[in-house]
Image (tube, coloured by chain):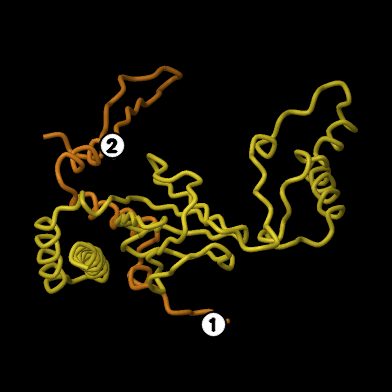
Chain colours: A orange, B yellow
Amino acid sequence: MASNAAVPFWRAAGMTYITYSNICANLVRNCLKEPYKTEAVTREKVHFSISKWTDGKPEKPTLRSDSPEE
Amino acid sequence: MLRRAMGLLARPIAASGARSFSTDLPAAQTADAMFVEAWNKVIPNMDPPKTPLSFMQPRPATPSSIPSKLTVNFVLPYASELATREVDMVIVPATTGQMGVLPGHVATIAELKPGVLSVHEGNETTKYFVSSGFVFIHANSFADIIAVEAAPLNQIDANLVQKGLSEFTQKLSSATTDLEKAEAQIGIDVHSALNSALTG
């Protein structure tokens, strides 16, 4: 068994499979027709709120999302 | 403490003997009988907890003659497109080329590239564009297709595909680092696959 079998070009460039797969999925989503495109984009939005804790008490949480809010 | 854990782990492994291939395993026996036995020896008063194995339906056994239909599960992270649907054939876009899967196909695991998945049932064909994923074909003529993103061909906008293709071709020529080149190449691959899916 070849230990250095031909690697895909993205792995040779240092990308992992997950990154590759997510890039492909994003590109496909961007090529959809409306209204499917807006549905896909809203479905994939990620929001989370982070609260830092100091001295056993939570501070005010901050809302984050993966798209920069205009 | 660790030595006791090793002792506990060693017992079931030694008892089960040689490991068989996952494709040859029969339908799961009574939900982990060995676990229940071991539990009852140590804690006879309490009922053993249910394990995930007891919730799972056993895999249908491999029939001795080739079944007439292929059972397909086509799932996406947010929905299951096809759930145990009986079809005649599916053609999946594997990295090694378009692979046709018929009932009785040999057990295979294949990685998918961006391309068209077509499901053939009787005289109808349904086509989806799949961004990437995997297909697991089991010996009992069940096929599990998992994709990150998939859309029927009529939901894809040809203008956006052309725009994307020219944009990424341009990015490839202006790319400097390996990573940028790889990203541009991925863009070109996906958009040209989309293009041939729409025109082919």
Contact between labelled residues 1 and 2, with CB atoms less than 8 Å apart: no
Query: In percent of the image, x 40 and y 60: which residue is there?
Result: A17
Query: In percent of the image, x 54 and y 60: which residue is there?
Result: B137
The vertical placement of B139 against B71, above or below, is below
Q: Which mark is residue B92?
A: none
Q: Estimate the spatial distance between the alpha carbons at disc 2 and disc 1, rounded to whole Å.
A: 42 Å
| Amino acid at the residue labelled 2 | Arg
* Residue annotated with mark 1: A2
Circle 1: element type: loop
Query: In this orientation, which residue lies closer to the viewer: A6 or B178?
Result: A6
Side of B46 where B112 appears, left or right: left
Q: Position of residue B84 (x, y in %)?
A: 51, 46
Res A13 → quadrant: bottom left
- Crowding around mark 1 (Cα neighbors within 10 Å: few <14, some 14 to 19, many 20+) is few
Query: In percent of the image, x 22 and y 70: which residue is there?
Result: B181
* Residue annotated with mark 2: A43
> Count the marks: how many?
2
Query: In this orientation, which residue lies closer to the viewer: B122 or B22?
Result: B122
Query: In percent of the image, x 25 and y 39: which residue is there?
Result: A66
Res B195 → quadrant: bottom left
**2 and 1 marks on the same chain:** yes
Q: Nearer the viewer, mark 2 or mark 1?
A: 2
Side of B175 where B123 appears, left or right: right
Disc 2 or 1, which lies upstream in sequence? 1
